[in-house]
Image (cartoon, coloured by chain):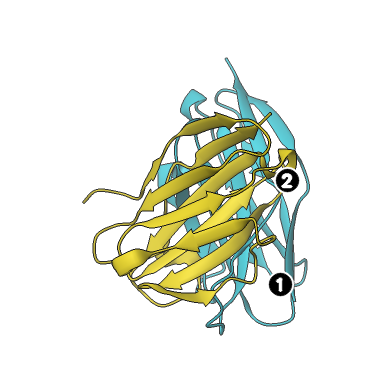
Chain colours: A yellow, B cyan
Amino acid sequence: EAGVTQFPSHSVIEKGQTVTLRCDPISGHDNLYWYRRVMGKEIKFLLHFVKESKQDESGMPNNRFLAERTGGTYSTLKVQPAELEDSGVYFCASSQEGPGPGSGYTFGSGTRLTVV
Amino acid sequence: AQSVTQLDSHVSVSEGTPVLLRCNYSSSYSPSLFWYVQHPNKGLQLLLKYTSAATLVKGINGFEAEFKKSETSFHLTKPSAHMSDAAEYFCVVTPTYSSASKIIFGSGTRLSIRP
């Protein structure tokens, strides 16, 4: 089966611009998660969708970040306006089971965002 | 609350020698523990998991890890390193009971293999 697909793989934007990251989960996976790793630090949770609903968005850093999952299929994560500290790698994961131990997660290869 | 500490940010070993990547955890509840690996330009791949069954867990590519409750450790080992093992490794913890969606990552250990 196809894995979790993220694009773009890399994005370089100027401070103040807008960037939209996309994640296509494994077909049939209701759960979709966004994580990010900034400045070589820990990978941190951003939010969790169950189908098209936001189950948990407690990790979203501020209101410059907007995530959507229209129709419960692919998801987008928009950063507007981007700031320097948003640079990092954004990972998406999907799972078929409910949340809990991460063994059901499949991660994408990530989008490397650089804000200059 | 859960947390995980990877004690080494970078480990370098010679090909054919043993690998040891260290991980200590803190958990208020019975934890589930995992090791993930990320090769350059690839996604995060599950290596192995511990979910309160056998304390010695075998994973893919010859890796294994032992859950030691008394030491709150879950170190990753491999008897003989291969060049293809060069990657970044993440120790992960989550409560076994939990319906929470978050999993907690360690800061990662970059493994280099010398020819």
x, y percent for residue B49:
50, 62
Whether callout 2 and callout 1 share a subunit is answered no
Q: Is residue B85 visible?
A: no
Q: Quadrant of residue A17?
A: top right
Q: Amino acid at mark 1?
A: Lys
What is the three-letter code of the residue carrying label 2?
Answer: Lys
Q: Disc 1 marks which residue?
A: B69
Q: Position of residue B31 (x, y in %)?
A: 63, 75
Image x and y of residue A8, in percent = 43, 36
Residue B11 sits in which quadrant? top right
The residue that label 2 is drawn on is: A41
Q: Is residue B84 above or below residue A36?
A: above
Chain letter, disc 2 residue: A
Give the answer, above or below, for where A67 lies relative to A52. Answer: above
> In this view of the protein, which residue sits in the foreground, A19 or A88?
A19
Q: Quadrant of residue A32?
A: bottom left
Label 2 and label 1: CA atoms lie apart by 26 Å
For the point 54% across and 33% down, the residue is: B80
Considering the numbered disc 1 on the image, is that residue within a helix, a strand or a loop?
Answer: loop
Report the label total. 2
Q: Nearer the viewer, residue B38 or B114?
A: B38
Residue A97 or residue B83, whichever sits in front: A97
For the N terminus of chain B, the quadrant is: bottom right
Q: Residue furthest left?
A: A1
Q: Residue at x 69, y 61 (%)?
A: A62
Res A116 seen here:
yes
Q: Quadrant of the C terminus of chain B?
A: top right
The residue depicted at 51 percent of the width and 49 percent of the height is A91
Neighbours of disc 1 within 10 Å: few (<14), some (14-19), many (20+): few
Q: Of circles 2 and 1, which is in front?
A: 2
